[in-house]
Amino acid sequence: MTTAANSHPLPVLDGHNDLPWAHRELAGYDLDRADIAEPQPALHTDLPRMREGGLAAQFWSVWVPPELAGEEAVAATHEQIDFVEAMCARYDEMVPARTAEEVEAAWARGRHAALIGMEGGHSIGGSLTTLAEMAERGARYMTLTHNDTTDWADSATDEPRHGGLTDFGHEVVREMNRLGVMVDLSHVSAQTMHDALDTTAMPVIFSHSNARAQCDHPRNVPDDVLARIPGNGGVVMVNFVPYFLDDTWAAWHIEAAARRRREEPVDHPLPTTRPGIEAVVRHLEYLRDVIGIDHLGIGADFDGVDQLPTDLGGVDTYPNLFAALTERGWSGAELTALAHGNALRVLRECSVRRA
């Protein structure tokens, strides 16, 4: 696990990777059919590339489609968690982790720490009891929505129905605080972000979001929300998705979503040029200026997207980003904070259950 810039170990704790669902679609969770101990060209993630890129801890997203609802969504989320557990059982170098201390213990043994994050409040089926069950199974964050507005929270990419969080939504946030489940505000509307920040007693995360001032997509974080992050103590984990890095790609993505809502074909051509590492650097440096180095992280979104920047095509490529940041004068301490230090701090602060 090294950086291209200085060849010393730099463990990465990434906030969001959709390998569980990608593997489900590729091989039905069958690790004999798609054994990630071997190179898997159809995926962004496998163990050889994880070692090469320094991916030492991962919040594996246990996302299920928003079209699933109620018990169907709950059951599918359990299946996703089952897959993360199956990876840990099969591969000696992967061990389950729920706390910062367990992540650090895994690293001390030369192991990868596997954490779990739920992506979308629909995964709890409207039940605080189910939320507690998911926490008991190891879920350490929940994104309050995915792309669709739920019965209790507005999404960034759907029509608002509640003006942010409902009363039950505020109750969900308080219960997450009590359970030690981090409140993830990626995917939610700006008003939902504000409502959650008004309610939470703990730091929040954005597990895979960028700066809206640098790319005008509703999935990104607006400046008035960013202004609240230092006071909250949270972390914004920048992702690598072109749609959320570059305005031209954002416009394509927004139009594609509008066509899908109208049940029209998405046949307008993609932009001809993909953004590169410099686009990720631009977001990171803007965020560093606005919220400070202590509130940055990485949530690349590998295996959850169909497009990635040039030179950031899989989990082996984190060193390319660190090399680019080093060339721009980022210090070793700043790179460490970005790679894992800040995310570990928030995990540590949120892991204690409250009465």
Image: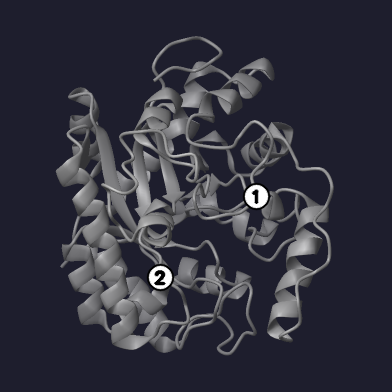
Residue 11 appears left or right of 193: left
158 or 349: nearer the eye? 158
Say which mark, if any, is on residue 60. none
Q: Give the residue at mark 2.
A: 64
> Hey, what amino acid is under mark 1?
Gln
Q: Give the residue at mark 1.
A: 307
User: x and y percent of residue 83 in the render?
Assistant: 26, 56
Q: Residue furthest front?
A: 33
**Position above or below: 295 against 171:** above
**Position above or below: 255 against 46:** below
**First of labels 2, 1 by sequence position:** 2
Residue 132 appears left or right of 165: left
SS of the residue under disc 2: loop
User: x and y percent of residue 179 in the render?
Assistant: 22, 65
User: x and y percent of residue 352 in the render?
Assistant: 20, 54
What residue is at 34 percent from the left and 46 percent from the top? Answer: 34
Residue 24: image quadrant is: bottom left
SS of the residue under disc 1: loop
Query: Mark 2 and mark 1: span between their CA atoms?
Result: 20 Å
What residue is at 28 percent from the left and 85 percent from the top? Answer: 71
**Position above or below: 18 against 126:** above
**Position above or below: 222 against 299:** below
What residue is at 50 percent from the left and 63 percent from the top? Answer: 185
> Hey, what amino acid is under mark 2?
Val
Residue 194: image quadrant is: bottom right
**Which image quadrant: the C terminus?**
bottom left
